[in-house]
Image (cartoon, grey):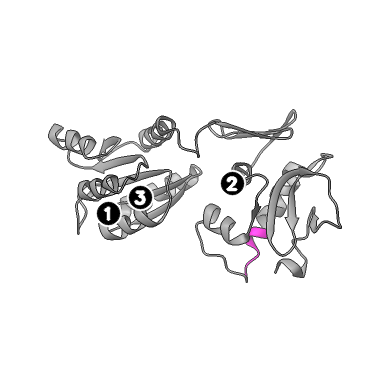
Amino acid sequence: MKVLLVEDEKNLGEYIKKGLTEAGFIVDHHMTGLDGYHALMTEDFSVVLMDVMLPDVSGFELVQRYRAAGKHTPVLFLTAKDDLSDRIKGIEIGGDDYLTKPFAFDELIVRIKSLLRRANQSDYKSSVIHIADLKMDIAKRTVHRGNTNIKLTAKEFALLQLFLERQGEVLPRTVIASQVWDINFDSDTNVIDVAIRRLRIKIDDGFDIKLIHTVRGMGYKLEPLNVDVDSGMGDDDTNKDDLK
């Protein structure tokens, strides 16, 4: 789940980004209203955290423009202003929730999850995703294959969730890098190959049906298939030149 954070206080922004990242979110942080608005209009997010008092333009104005453009992503206002009139204004111009500073981080997480459930976003339509005998419970942060509990790191969980939400699709490394690591793909790094290899070990080793497959020259695919070495797909081709 990708979060847009527009917050001009550097320390607070870094604190929120760090905490949300550890909670499994991908966070895009901007410190000015114009940069935040550009991200709003050009990228897709699951939820928006918008500071009201920005140095260049009001967060209220940004959200009002965003709603006028027909955009419906949930918005949570973050502000030190606790006047009732401000809270009412924030909701009336298109905000979905309002959290005053300072706030407990646990409350921020709860409010974000509540917004996702209420909006019935595709990222949170169902807290449980299945493929074959593998089950992921997003809300509980658990993964099982049959009766086996599989323990994953935060990045492995996010990677598997991406595969599950787009099962059957071939995912290029560029897509995986942007969605899971929030970085531009660098062909000189093997971080994606290594992460997928580790995930493959955890969810495929010891099971007859393999789920993660390499599509030579294209990327990776999640699908419950028997391995066919002549089809261009394999269990682990991550060390081969044709994926470099």
Identify the amino acid type marked 3: Leu
Q: Residue at x 43, y 34 (%)?
A: 113
Taking 238 as reference, is 188 left or right?
Answer: left
Secondary structure, mark 1, is loop
Gap in angstroms between the C-alphas marked 3 and 2: 21 Å
Gap in angstroms between the C-alphas marked 1 and 2: 31 Å
Q: In the rendered view, would you say 240 is above or below 233?
A: below
Identify the amino acid type marked 2: Leu
Q: Percent position (x, y) of residue 210? A: 79, 44
Q: In the rendered view, would you say 230 is above or below 212?
A: below
Q: Foreground residue, 189 or 47?
A: 47
Find disc 2 in the rendering and name its residue: 162
**Number of other residues with Cα within 10 Å of mark 1, as a class: few under 14, some 14 to 19, many 20 or more:** few
Q: Residue at x 32, y 56 (%)?
A: 36
Find disc 3 in the rendering and name its residue: 5
Find disc 1 in the rendering and name its residue: 9
Q: Residue at x 66, y 38 (%)?
A: 151
Identify the amino acid type marked 1: Glu
- Residue interval drawn in magenta: 188-193
Say which mark, if any, is on residue 186.
none
